[in-house]
Amino acid sequence: MSALPSVSGKNRAVGAGTYDVVVVGAGFAGMYMLHRLRGFGLSARVYEQGSDVGGTWYWNRYPGARCDVESMQYSYSFSNELQQDWEWSERYAPQPEILKYANHVADRFDLRKDIQLDTRVDRAAFDEEANTWSVTTSDGNTVVAKYVVLATGCLSNARMPDIKGLAGFKGKVYHTGHWPHEPVDFTGLRVGVIGTGSSAIQSVPVIAEQASHLTVFQRTANFSIPARNAALTPEERDSFRSNYPELRRVAREETKNGILQELPDRGALDDGDNERRVKYEARWSRGGLTFMSVYNNLAIDKAANDTAANFVRGKIAEIVRDPGTAKLLQPNNHPIGTKRICIDTDYFATFNRPNVTLVDIKSDPIEEITANEVRTGARDYKVDALVLATGFDAMTGSVARIDIRGRNGQTLNQKWAEGPKTYLGVMSAGFPNLFIITGPGSPSVLSNMMVSIEQHVDWIADCVSYLRDRDLVSIEAKKDAEEKWVAHVNEVAQTTLYPQANSWYMGANIPGKPQIFMPYIGGVAVYRQICNDVAAKGYEGFAMTAAEHPRAAAAS
């Protein structure tokens, strides 16, 4: 296949051409995918709608944005030199540092020459005769590729709320998932934050320090654990670096979520009240996502889960001085951990500030937004700026924005109208040679995304190499294998407490979106083994087509 001339930097215009692979998205998934494909000598083109690499970390620049996985673990493992050389500054890396890391990777591995920025993929159509994809981009160009890899990200399609009057608001409006690239100063302003998910929990304490008054409009209270963020010491960095091979192996092969943590040997009710409280206190003091791994049954046993939930509710009551405000901030409509648990720095304490007001819009909903007010049924709240912390159309939203047409012209949106269907989360029946990185039906957002990204990229790269070595022109998930996998994903989810929450895991935050549990909850170690077994059995559950050689065809 002939590849197009490489284009780097700000040179956007590219004529029609042919590639082995088109990759959609230049976040951590797309960059590593490009690196692996190059290693096989394949021609690849990456299209990125942003003006630089970084994906989620390019767009999410809101105040206080940082990763909820420890930085020494939220990093690539494919290059030992990279993981030994890079200096993470904090336990939880802030967004600017993660973006700097992404740019460093792009430069270090010379990835930019095959990445076209400021370019959105609008359409991809499969040619059944040629077994290729025609990919049309926002600049009007169309290229042809044997394979398309969707590295579009799970939390990259910001959800704008449908609130009456929003378009007529006279002040500035910001969405946490699509933040300006220049600093935003809220000094002296009356600010309204709508939503109390992870981005609000991170940004509210920072905004409160600037704003003359901050009003937080909360529909659903969320559980949050202190991050206990701190600067990394040289000793902490060196400890990780000297043990990286084993630590990475454990994360991949022995954990449920790709995060290193002590594995519990008992359930919450196996300990007495005092012993249990001591353990919860220790994890609360330590901070971070590992709070949920104190016991081994918090995700499956409601009575056990209640002990953890009640502990956190008690902590909120201790921190927040006003009893009414504390009660509103205590989650009571879902088991702890069934929505992605948040980690914070002084979120609950922020509501002790005299310039912060909490408004419960579940009991007093927002009716409309006027030129300079947020109006609920009870009163009007004057605001100079609005921050929409209203989340994302998760896991499928970015894919849904592309007109993807497979066999018989069927669109992926038509197929997924009643919920996403995939085999292993990497392919969907009827869409040959179309791969998805960390798609629905894989551990994805329930895991350390870097661990899941690397596993998917490696599996896809090895699969493409397998097809090339055997002169196979297409691979496609079999319908029966896909149906069994979708059933398995849901069956495993139903053994847990997760479906009890109206979460974005279920698509419940998007009006009209089918509610189906999207990520695979069986764990990254179990999932990795399943994927490896499928590949070892000659890609069991996939249909492959051999190239039709002219001589052989004529002889037959």
Image: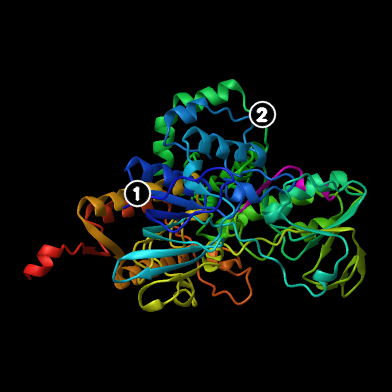
The residue indicated by pointer 2 is 231
Q: Which quarter of the image is occupied by the C terminus?
A: bottom left
349 magenta-colored: yes
**Mark linked to residue 3:** none
Q: Residue 15, relative to residue 73: is it above or below?
A: below
The residue indicated by pointer 1 is 461
Q: Residue 244, relative to residue 58: is it above or below?
A: above
513 lies left or right of 310? left
Spot occupied by residue 433 in the image (x, y as percentages of width and height): 34, 62
**Image point (25%, 54%), residue name:** 467
Disc 1 element: helix
Does the image show residue 315? no
Q: Residue 138, relative to residue 259: is it above or below?
A: below
489 lies left or right of 131? right
Which residue is more in the foreground, 190 or 270? 190
Spot occupied by residue 407 in the image (x, y as percentages of width and height): 35, 74
